[in-house]
Amino acid sequence: MRQGEAGISMQRSVLTDIVRHHAAKTPDAIALVFEERETSFAALDRHASQVANGLIAAGLHPGDRVAYLGKNSDLYFEYWLGAAKAGIVLVPINWRLAPPEVAYILGDCEPRMVLADPEFLDRLDTDAGYKPMSTSDFATWRDAQDATDPAREAGYDDAVLQLYTSGTTGNPKGALLSNRSLLALRQDTPVDRMPAWNRWTAKDVALIAMPIFHISGSGWGMWSLQHGGKGIVVREFDPHQVLDLLTRYRITKIMMVPTAMKIVCDHPDAAGTDFSFLQTICYGGSAIPLDLMRQAIAVFGCGFAQMYGMTETAGTIVGLPPEDHDPDGNARMRGIGVPLPGVEVRIVGEDGIELPRGAVGEIATRSTANMIAYYNRPDATAETVDSDGWLRTGDAGYMDEDGYLYLADRIKDMIITGGENVYPAEVENALYSHPDVADVAVIGVSDPKWGEAVKAIVVPVEGRTPDPAALIAWARERIAAYKAPKTIAFRETLPRNPSGKILRRLLRDEYR
């Protein structure tokens, strides 16, 4: 079998093979750093085995679920790898969600155990049938377990991670990602065919700053481990801390959303810092404004790559390489790049038939990175992935003659604020329940800090004059704070088409 960059026989390797390999080859190499705590590959492998045996001793079986409700931590990766060694699926939950949203996900995935940070334990239901555990007690529990590797991991095509997507018009769906989804694109691609910006080696030091409940956090961390690199785990994104960690650990790779990039660039210490060790900044979640691109190039002086993907594709499937980033601007910078090796992308019409170059349609993709399915949602799965393996992304776009992709619009009216996905219907449902709201539409408007901000246009109940602050507070009690509107506008009616559908495009044009 072909040998990968780090020497491991990469073909058909599963997550747990990766840590075993590096523990045997470079046992003392540091795999993870978290708040001054260093974990070697040997220790990570041992801890994963202990977690696996602890889960087995607790009566869990292959295919069971365990959940994680907490901020970024090295313990998360131990928990994930330990679950994988026992054939168990990990479900990380967005800690920013409102309690009813957390309760829905826990009810949907039915975990046998939930590991949570102490500040989130009050969101757990002790009568729900799962065992709650605080991260403050995790190490003591782990170290009481046998360190013998149980070697009971899931197969290459079995699920090892269940990530919940934001709901569009209904509840969130759990996307099932297998070992193949997470690893195959890199395992199956010879190093010389991988874009230079997307190559990793054991010498890389990666900053894991994106939240681990997103594929951008979990996937980025796993890429680092896959290649024997060192991952610096950040509990929460803090520009002051990021600058310190970048220089202290001489980080070579970092992923952040443009909003975070601007915060770091605007920090008073950034301009005077030597970033010569930094090779690549990958960004995603939204396009980068040209002015910010110029500022970032001046501050960091490294390569920049835009990444496009989604939870259902296990992360990045399309990338805009550094050579297409021009501080003077160019046509390609308005796009999202070209498909990665091993990824097929085409533009299709409503009938699923491929459209000619330049025509706007829905972006569809097929690769080994695609999810297995939505958990317990066969109808939703069938609507998203066809019998030939083509996954419809829900994004509208077009492809030029050179194979570069461009986003034209978001078919589902999704708002991206600070790198987080927000669906208007979810916010509208929260506001509709207010007694002073007769009608409401939610749109995204340009925002210099967040890229987009959530704005609600409300038609008040006749005779009522609702307070905007009260409406925002009402929404924040029912959905995550980042989903709640930042501003409220009032009007007498909302524009609708003959079938009654709100014309959000007209509202976006008006309020932008």
Image (spheres, rainbow, N blue to C red):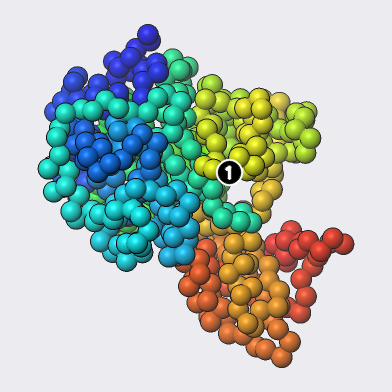
Closest to the observer: 441 or 180? 180
Give the quarter of the figure containing the N terminus: top left
Q: Is residue 108 above or below residue 6?
A: below
How many tags in the picture? 1
Residue 179 percent location from the top left of the image: 41, 28
Q: Residue at x 22, y 46 (%)?
A: 34
For badge 1, the amino acid type reads Arg
Asked if residue 219 lies left or right of residue 494, the reply is left
Residue 497, image quadrant? bottom right
Q: Residue at x 47, y 61 (%)?
A: 101
Residue 439 percent location from the top left of the image: 71, 74
Residue 55 percent location from the top left of the image: 26, 41
Q: Which residue in the structure is indicated by mark 1? A: 377
Question: Label 1: how many residues lie within 10 Å, few (<14), some (14-19) or many (20+)?
Answer: few
Asked if residue 503 lies left or right of residue 199, the reply is right
Q: Residue at x 60, y 78 (%)?
A: 434
Q: Secondary structure at mark 1?
A: loop
Residue 297 percent location from the top left of the image: 43, 42
Q: Residue at x 61, y 56 (%)?
A: 170
Closest to the observer: 146 or 72? 146
Asked whether residue 337 appears in the rendered view, the answer is: yes
